């Protein structure tokens, strides 16, 4: 079933390319799905890959998902050809589906303020959940970055947090007054004084909080706030970037805060500045 080659490829991505565990896991799932469909990865040709994509399209997969699967299959066969000294990869002639420009979903300032007023309560779990919301919106970090934070990553006196992002790249991001206040309260209420290496956010068993639990916390608080649109921890990251740009922050600074390698990734948030320009034009131009 070619699984040893898949494992070698994933190990290469993990060790040499420095991809995150979540990305490697997603790539593994894509390759195993393709392997299960094709039966034998050694005998695959470009026609097989084309039929596989047609099969996924019939099942309703979005263009973004199809594009990622093509990219993974292409990377895998390039790696395999290099390892086996082969010249022809069956995936090189496959064209990725065209991707539309998707505007990220974000919260308005009013919705954000309502969400950040929750949860209301004084027990440890409610204090932790409030701190999580404040940190996610106050720093723009990814959910994986948040759950991997240790106490030693924080400097609450100076207001900075060290984040380990994609590809093990570190960046320093400022933490706002509210986020620091709720973190201090949360650490004070914990049963034992945490060490520098201790996870910042814990579950009810005293273990590091998982991504899934963090997801549920955000969804639960959104419902309590009366926000019924689709929302996730990443929505707070989108809101962080959008609100900064709407208040005239420059794109390069937002890029650094988000930890984007390429500024083209950050440019998706310029929809808000374009919308504001349109409103100004319509309001003030005599022939608008």
Image: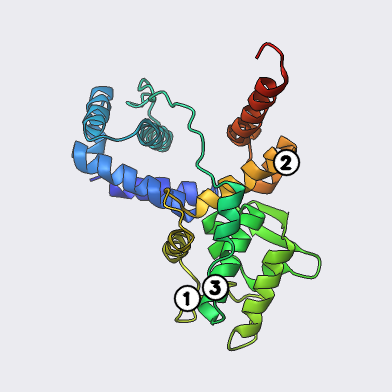
* Residue 41, placed above or below residue 178: above
Mark 3, Cα crowd under 10 Å, few <14 / some 14-19 / many 20+, is few
For the point 29% across and 48% down, the residue is 3
Q: In this figure, which residue is indicated by the disc labeled 2?
A: 247
* Residue 283, placed above or below residue 173: above
Q: In this figure, which residue is indicated by the disc labeled 1?
A: 203
For the point 69% across and 76% down, the residue is 184
- N-term mark: 3 or 1: 3
Image-based side of 51 in relation to 261, left or right? left
Image-based side of 247 in relation to 103, left or right? right
Q: Are marks 1 and 2 in contact (CB under 8 Å)?
A: no
Alpha carbons under labels 2 and 3: distance apart: 29 Å
Mark 3 or 1, closer to the camera:
3
Residue 94: percent from left, percent from top: 35, 22
SS for callout 1: loop
Number of disc labels? 3
Residue 272: percent from left, percent from top: 62, 34
Q: Is residue 8 visible?
A: no
Image-based side of 192 in relation to 50, left or right? right
**Which corner quadrant of the image does residue 52 belong to?**
top left
Residue sitting nearer the eye, 148 or 253: 253
Mark 1 or 2, closer to the camera:
2
């Amino acid at each position: 079933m070619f699984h040893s080659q898949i494992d070698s490829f994933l190990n290469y991505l993990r060790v040499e390319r420095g991809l995150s565990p979540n990305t490697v896991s997603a790539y593994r799932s894509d390759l195993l799905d393709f392997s299960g469909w094709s039966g034998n990865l050694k005998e695959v040709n470009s026609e097989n890959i084309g039929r596989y994509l047609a099969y996924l399209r019939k099942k309703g997969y979005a263009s973004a998902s199809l594009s990622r699967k093509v990219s993974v299959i292409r990377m895998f066969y390039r790696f395999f050809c290099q390892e086996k000294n082969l010249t022809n990869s069956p995936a090189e002639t496959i064209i990725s589906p065209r991707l539309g420009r998707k505007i990220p979903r974000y919260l308005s300032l009013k919705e954000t303020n309502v969400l950040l007023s929750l949860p209301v309560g004084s027990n440890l779990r409610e204090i932790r959940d409030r701190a999580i919301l404040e940190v996610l919106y106050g720093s723009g970090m990814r959910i994986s970055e948040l759950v991997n934070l240790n106490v030693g990553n924080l400097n609450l006196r100076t207001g900075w947090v060290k984040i380990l992002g994609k590809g093990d790249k570190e960046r320093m991001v400022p933490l706002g007054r509210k986020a620091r206040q709720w973190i201090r309260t949360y650490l004070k209420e914990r049963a034992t004084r945490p060490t520098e290496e201790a996870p910042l956010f814990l579950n009810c068993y005293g273990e590091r909080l998982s991504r899934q639990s963090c997801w549920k916390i955000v969804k639960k608080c959104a419902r309590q706030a009366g926000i019924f649109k689709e929302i996730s921890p990443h929505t707070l990251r989108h809101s962080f970037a959008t609100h900064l740009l709407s208040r005239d922050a420059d794109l390069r600074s937002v890029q650094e805060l988000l930890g984007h390698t390429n500024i083209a990734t950050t440019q998706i948030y310029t929809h808000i500045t374009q919308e504001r320009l349109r409103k100004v034009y319509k309001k003030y131009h005599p022939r608008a």
